[in-house]
Amino acid sequence: MSNILPPQMARKMYADMLRIRQFDTKVVELVDDDLIPGSCHEYCGQEAVAVGVCSALTDKDILTSTHRGHGHTLAKGGDVGKMFAELFGRSAGYNKGRGGSMHIADVSLGIFGANGIVGAGAPIACGAAHKFKAAGEPHVAVSFFGDGAINQGVVHEAMNLAAIWRLPVIFVCENNLYAMTTPLREVTILELHERAQSYGMASIKVDGMDVGAVFDAALSAVERARSGGGPSFLQCDTYRYFGHYSGERHMKTTYRTQQEIDEWKKRDPLDLWAERLIRGSICSAQDIERMKREVDDEIAQGVEYARGCPTPSPQDALEYMYAVNYPYTPAKGAEQ
Amino acid sequence: MSNILPPQMARKMYADMLRIRQFDTKVVELVDDDLIPGSCHEYCGQEAVAVGVCSALTDKDILTSTHRGHGHTLAKGGDVGKMFAELFGRSAGYNKGRGGSMHIADVSLGIFGANGIVGAGAPIACGAAHKFKAAGEPHVAVSFFGDGAINQGVVHEAMNLAAIWRLPVIFVCENNLYAMTTPLREVTILELHERAQSYGMASIKVDGMDVGAVFDAALSAVERARSGGGPSFLQCDTYRYFGHYSGERHMKTTYRTQQEIDEWKKRDPLDLWAERLIRGSICSAQDIERMKREVDDEIAQGVEYARGCPTPSPQDALEYMYAVNYPYTPAKGAEQ
Amino acid sequence: MRQLRFLQAMNEAYRQVMAQDESVMILGEDIRGGIRGETKGLHAAYGDDRVLDTPISEAAFTGFATGAALAGLRPIVQFQVPSLIYVAFDQLVNQAAKMRLMLGGQADLPVTYTIMVSGTRGGNAGQHSDNPYPYLVHAGFKVVCPSTAYDAKGLMIQAIREQDPVVFIASAMSLPQKGEVPEDIYTVPLGKGQVRRPGTDVTVVAVGHLVPEALAVADSLFEKRGISVEVWDPRTLLPFDRDGLLESVRKTGRVVIYDDTNRSCGYASEISAILGEHAFSYLVAPIKRITRADIPLPYNPDLEAAVLPSPKQLEQAICSAWSYSKS
Amino acid sequence: MRQLRFLQAMNEAYRQVMAQDESVMILGEDIRGGIRGETKGLHAAYGDDRVLDTPISEAAFTGFATGAALAGLRPIVQFQVPSLIYVAFDQLVNQAAKMRLMLGGQADLPVTYTIMVSGTRGGNAGQHSDNPYPYLVHAGFKVVCPSTAYDAKGLMIQAIREQDPVVFIASAMSLPQKGEVPEDIYTVPLGKGQVRRPGTDVTVVAVGHLVPEALAVADSLFEKRGISVEVWDPRTLLPFDRDGLLESVRKTGRVVIYDDTNRSCGYASEISAILGEHAFSYLVAPIKRITRADIPLPYNPDLEAAVLPSPKQLEQAICSAWSYSKS
Ligand SMILES: Cc1ncc(C[n+]2csc(CCOP(=O)(O)OP(=O)(O)O)c2C)c(N)n1
Ligand SMILES: Cc1ncc(C[n+]2csc(CCOP(=O)(O)OP(=O)(O)O)c2C)c(N)n1
Ligand SMILES: [Mg+2]
Ligand SMILES: [Mg+2]
């Protein structure tokens, strides 16, 4: 465990992980109940990464997320109710029901959005980092992406931009060993973080199930970035508990063994951290139970709130597209 | 100098470099005389790279080239006359006047073509290599690209494909220190070949002005590839004598100093090799002079031949596009 | 006759062509696992070298197919979702689409690109739901967009056998559709449209998965109002069966184009422009386009429905074309 | 009034907006060197943070601009040659073009994309000579395509000031054109076309660098045959000034569209489709499109000329529209 961590923060990190776990557990239920359209990619199992990294950030720092974005958004302070409202496609949702899971964002909190395209957020984070650097602001930009994204060219281009311009960016590669059904070992040789090294940036591997370890690594990366030391790359080894997306539960996939899943669950990030909190006398078992109840309430209230929100009016369907202030633009689908 | 090099081959390598030098020197003249349309990117200064690499190849091996492709094409056995015919846009040209400098190709010789898009040839080479590997053929694919291409995402994606599938590919990065006006040092940190290392492939830097050194490195890469050892990366440090393209001679560019150009010319690949041939008693100074005359004749004859070739008929302008055997396809520009 | 789903028809086409022709290979993401079903069994039958699971490197694997084709193979490139063509766009429109002409005909390029779940709906939101064929038609690719399981198999086999790059649009809404599919190998020729329902009053050009919708609207309008609608399915978007369409329009003089892509510079625009040029003398009503609105699909299902082409809009357009008389 | 070349007008627009608004920055390849001239002097005046020479990483620097804009800057992205948009295509059409809607309006995206030497000619062959605006219109970008130095400055300034992504097409053939350009800052509004030459018999819609060609053809046809051609310049391709065009066509009833992009699903198709829908009742002749052929530009200048839209084709089309009467 991180030595420097104040107890209050250590507890908050547990609660934050719990919120993500319970949120996405609920999401699976709601998808099965047909209350959420489209596809959701659950974050359960990877909580230590989002929370470890985001605990090192302020509201002014920004992040770009992935298709598996609920965890990042919650860890950065996203509101449970507004998130459910978005997943339900309501107008009170973060994206006013336009984006859903794969675009969920709170720009005011520096959450620049989930992204349906693997790797696409990396250069976007660099651009925001340039703004911070050019304006002399001490903020940083974090780009989350999966192990699969390491083979997407734009991620490399982005790492190079960050390196040559010494941008305050942290590339966080969440290595959960699979991209959909494709095992990492079949599509890469060597360790992922070695790729980043070749651009001339600090690059390390951390235990992505240990929120303290992730936090420590993130904190030094953030400090490096804030003090003009340029970008860093964190490879966080972790695991996803559910399938690639909610729907996978009802399919017969064979790319992972139950044994492998069980092995990883033995190092569950929440259990590990709870144990350490208790061992370090930062929490009692009762505190943990209380946090669980609190988070369960928060989730239940969020769902409740979201269910009560109105859906957007189809008349406004063209709203928010560019050029809406010009006649006939955007073109409707039928004669106008 | 390479120890294993038979004298005849050493002489041929000189003649091959000379042919490229004289060819592109002629091209500059012809561009200035408005006999060649479009833009040409001259290869002068970099001859040792194309010749060193291609001397390690057979007719069955293939290569993908770049916008600066005359050298690769000539080194792989391209015909001077057909090349000039293509540059003049004649129907006897390699591409029947359709491609010009930026597409020049001889598929029958394994020259899959120059390419106007930086980095775009890299994955194409990989696909050909897969064919060789799958068919159990001992051939290799070479992908040439510049230092600028190292920052194009697709090149990374291609290197990874080659590495994970152990494809018989050789990536040859011709580092002439500039991409147009942009100095390498401003757009990369660390050495280029370190990028390739991170994919888990053999990767080295060679003196790209020394054709023997390039040949040695290429030969071991080719042997590795032929024997199932997978891809390699060669960084060849070299220099271009002319501007980025012919037209630059008439502009006032300042991105390189005359002093730098002069320094590099002191290590001219032809001079270096001639010296070694003479020192090693493989050639006499007279032999060198004779070769020069022979090559000059070849170039002059090539130009002569090309000038005499007919130009394609505008009626055939839609020829070679896909779908020509269907009515109205490809669509003409006016009513049909 | 035996019924198969569109997806199964694709699978059968892949299997039969691969069995017949050793040079055919397939590559893309998660092909071996074959979650959706169209690639099921291929890896077991044809092995590592012919059935490749790729990294998430669409630009590279698209270029890879170009190189493999130049070297003598006949690759099928699968895009798992339609928007993946955008990261591979240079390798598609600026390399493959131009290769043969730029080479002066030195080589053919027999590559098939399958665009899975094209134009998907149901809350996949803006980045996954495009139906991107107008981009590919503009670039000069041959593009097929089958509307039945029968055509899916026949056009796929033909696509793979072509010497040119061919894009196969596997519309999300078509994949589960069932239809009669012969067990033997057969082909459907490129560039031939088909009258799916004869009629005399109004021609509806319906593309891909909108064909069944158009048929339903046509039937109901005939019942309700006695309007005789001819539904015409282009099947191949490029090369386009202009003569087939003109024959229909010569009869009806009235046209509605029903197409599930963005409107501006979309496929319906092209069809309309062809008619504006070549059918002017027998058109008796404005050419109507019913298309997507020019926005990325919003997530909320009601908003989504509001910007998609709908049977109701089609019905209105048919009625208005039918009742139009020049003032 | 002072005359400037189109390229100089662009440079002046850049300089004036950058002087006025600190949030404006520009990035792209070889910007600082400014070989062609449109970025000359910017680096010296506005420094490293606002004038960035990028590596050859178009996808990344396009996404970079998106992030910079979300963080509060107003970036201009320069594509050195038009085909570079293809390697950045996902970041353009699937990210930037969709960002605001997907975010539910949480942020604007004030980015300008300058596409240099668009549609270039003279032997640059297939990969560098595209005029790729139909792709961008289809994707929903605002697109301006000025035909004069005056409009180049005014539309550029307006483009940079818009809160939305705007594509600026800098046609290769227009760059050396000279025209009157006021020294002050001024804007030309988006979505407003312009009659460049009034006429009563036939409307020619000419896009970008084809405007001067169309004017010359119009003049000569008037002299030779007394045909009165109205030349209409859309100036902005999206939003499109439909009312402006309809006004002209209402008068003439005959239209030729003169556009230097690929034909199928091209920009001329869209204009034709709009007219087929909205001008039907006053059209008296087929709508003609004079465009590029649907092939990459061949290298040889004679072949190139054969597939480009030509004044001769335009003249024939005008005459045929003019003499057309329904049989
Ligand atoms: C460029 C691109 N290619 C493919 C896809 C389809 N796809 C969505 S998620 C995914 C796997 C991503 O794997 P990884 O980056 O490891 O993230 P994880 O799902 O494991 O969190 C794929 C292939 C996509 N959305 N974007
Ligand atoms: C993807 C892409 N970006 C930009 C260009 C424009 N361009 C042509 S050559 C060139 C420089 C290439 O530099 P390098 O790879 O080092 O090759 P060199 O010219 O030095 O041989 C650029 C930027 C292009 N053709 N393709
Ligand atoms: Mg993963
Ligand atoms: Mg270079």
Image (cartoon, coloured by chain):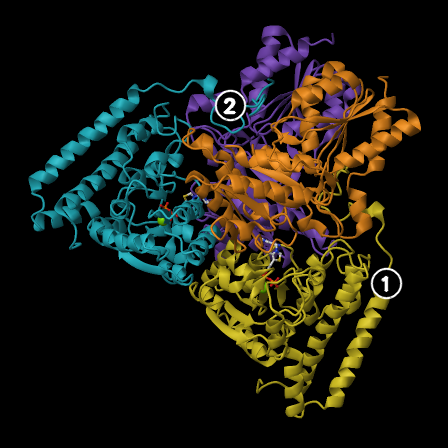
Chain colours: A yellow, B cyan, C orange, D purple
Q: Which mark is residue A307?
A: 1
Horizontally, residue D72 falls left or right of residue B29, namely right
Please identify the quadrant where the C terminus of chain A is shown.
top right
> How far apart, in angstroms, are the residues tagged by discs 2 and 1?
59 Å
Q: Residue furthest right?
A: C224
Q: Residues within 10 Å of mark 1 (few under 14, many from 20)?
A: some
Q: Is residue B205 visible?
A: yes
Q: Which mark is residue D45?
A: none
Task: Please tell me which residue lies in front, A30 or A234.
Answer: A30
In which quadrant of the rendered view does residue D133 lie? top right
Which one is closest to the eye, mark 2 or mark 1?
Answer: 1
SS class of the residue under badge 2? helix
> What amino acid is labelled 1 in the image?
Arg
| Disc 1 Cβ-to-ligand 1 distance below 8 Å | no
Residue A91 vertical position relative to residue D155 in the rendered view, above or below: below
Residue B247 vertical position relative to residue A76 in the rendered view, above or below: above
User: x, y (%) of residue A329?
Assistant: 74, 39
Name the subunit of mark 2: D
Horizontally, residue C318 falls left or right of residue A137, namely right
User: x, y (%) of residue B151?
Assistant: 44, 53
SS class of the residue under badge 1? helix
Q: Which mark is residue D307?
A: 2
Task: Please tell me which residue lies in front, A191 or C215.
Answer: C215
> What amino acid is labelled 2 in the image?
Val
Residue C44 vertical position relative to residue A144 in the rendered view, above or below: above
In which quadrant of the rendered view does residue D317 lie? top right
Q: Residues within 10 Å of mark 2 (few under 14, many from 20)?
A: many
Ligand 1 lies in quarter: bottom right
